Image (cartoon, coloured by chain):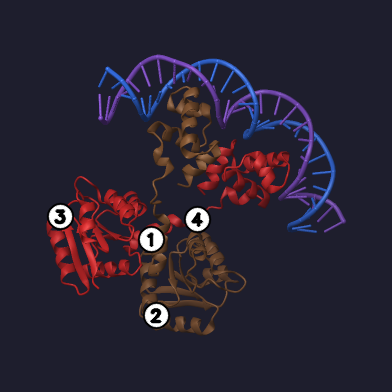
Chain colours: A red, B brown, C blue, D purple
DNA sequence: CCAGTCCTCGCATACTTATGTGATTTTTTG
DNA sequence: CAAAAAATCACATAAGTATGCGAGGACTGG
């Protein structure tokens, strides 16, 4: 059973080239090629592609917005972004919106076909620089964090606070008196250089 | 100039095989192959590899711990994890620790060599399933979020609170009275179903 | 033009936090 | 073992937060 592919790309020569590429490849089947996403929903319902090749800079509705809709309404269809943009904002917006792959347009045709196959088989192909960017975004800060200065007990108290507990509830959870909770929080504030639960939790959650 | 590669792998046959693979490949140079990370620092300083091939399940010091140290002390050296583990905990712990690539041991030798080259050139090779996992972790929840129910003004107030501001400071920043701030917060609590700044911020920051 | 939503402001009160000061016990570590 | 660090508890007060009740003006889409 062939992999069904739809293409959204406003540059017609490129769109035609991609369509041809797909059509002339074994095991791939073109499920539509369009210059905008104005009828996305209807086209999706009509042709049920397995993989959508999506440009970002489209007229009226951006590819990122379209990816979001598509991911919401057709969670089984994978979106492979194909764009010239490699700025972090668009890369991460697209991924957050639900893209399963992100290729730059300089990618050679053979690699694009490989990537489609890879997406279909449960992978997430990315251009090397994009993958590195994604990886880096997950790296923990190399600087030793203030949070690492907390003692185990203090860390526990902070975690409980971040879970939405009041002093009273933390005391109950940790089986200590509320005054002890206060003392721990005092120390936490000193170490994190803050003066409210709010700030402490912000540091904790955005580490 | 050849790419210098160090290997940390406690299974000796596999370690020898990897070492041989590297040694017999053009443009690659073996900078050491070890069964544990006990002398990591000294070995790194002595041989200055460009890429480190790292197993996770090592005696004494885990590959994840080693990756963390390595990433802190030698930020220019890239770590490529090569392991049998594909559970989310280890995958993400390794990546957070600073890994620049993550391959499963079932990866064919040719692909391992490709991956080393890719890491060296600024990429971040991952086994397909791993890449998909990473991608998914960045996807925004498909369910419409409570936070999207907030009006612009409410969102502003919540953002200011999450930045560590008190009611008074929020009032000043937003140029409104503190009573208005209270009202907005009241609505925010209703919409997010919470009863304290703490909980509201937790929802905001962990969106 | 009217119902609905948003943004604004005020007042009051019970409850919670922030912070000062002080102290005892247990655990860790050189 | 002795010093240092961690964990525990107490009491007190100023400041801040949570929530109830009430209300007027601006804008929006029937």
Q: Is residue B163 visible?
A: no
Is residue A163 shown left or right of residue A153? left
The reply to whether callout 4 and callout 3 are in contact (CB within 8 Å) is: no
Left/right placement of residue B163 relative to residue B59 reads left
Name the N-terminal-most of marks 1 and 3. Answer: 3
Secondary structure type for disc 1: helix
- Marks 4/1: CA distance? 14 Å
The residue at which mark 3 appears reads as A11
Above or below, A144 against A23 in this view is above
| Residue B58 visible in the picture | yes
Q: CA distance from mark 4 to mark 2?
A: 30 Å
Q: Which residue is mark 4?
A: A140
Q: Secondary structure at mark 2?
A: helix
Q: CA distance from mark 1 to mark 3?
A: 28 Å
- What crowding class fits label 2: few (fewer than 14 Cα within 10 Å), some (14-19), or many (20 or more)? some
Q: Which mark is residue A132?
A: 1
Viewer-closest of B73 and A184: A184
Q: Describe the element under mark 4 as helix, strand or loop.
A: loop
The chain to which mark 2 is attached is: B
Write the residue at 57% across / 73% down: B58
Residue B109, numbered circle: 2
Q: Residues within 10 Å of mark 4 (few under 14, many from 20)?
A: some
């Amino acid at each position: 059973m062939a992999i069904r592919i739809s293409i959204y790309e406003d540059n017609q020569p490129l769109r035609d080239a991609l369509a041809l590429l797909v059509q002339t490849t074994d095991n791939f089947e073109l499920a539509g090629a369009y210059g905008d996403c104005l009828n996305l929903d209807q086209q999706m319902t009509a042709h049920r592609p397995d993989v959508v090749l999506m440009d970002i800079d489209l007229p009226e509705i951006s590819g990122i917005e379209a990816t979001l809709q598509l991911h919401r309404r057709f969670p089984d269809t994978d979106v492979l972004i194909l764009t010239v943009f490699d700025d972090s904002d668009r890369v991460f917006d697209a991924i957050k919106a639900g893209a399963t792959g992100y290729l730059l347009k300089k990618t050679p045709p053979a690699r694009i076909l490989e990537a489609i196959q890879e997406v279909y088989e449960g992978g997430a192909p990315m251009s090397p620089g994009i993958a590195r960017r994604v990886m880096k975004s997950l790296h923990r800060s190399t600087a030793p964090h203030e949070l690492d200065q907390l003692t185990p007990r203090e860390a526990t108290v902070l975690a409980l606070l971040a879970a939405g507990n009041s002093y009273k509830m933390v005391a109950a959870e940790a089986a200590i008196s509320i005054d002890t909770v206060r003392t721990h929080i005092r120390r936490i504030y000193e170490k994190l250089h803050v003066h409210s639960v709010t700030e402490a939790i912000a540091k904790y959650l955005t580490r």
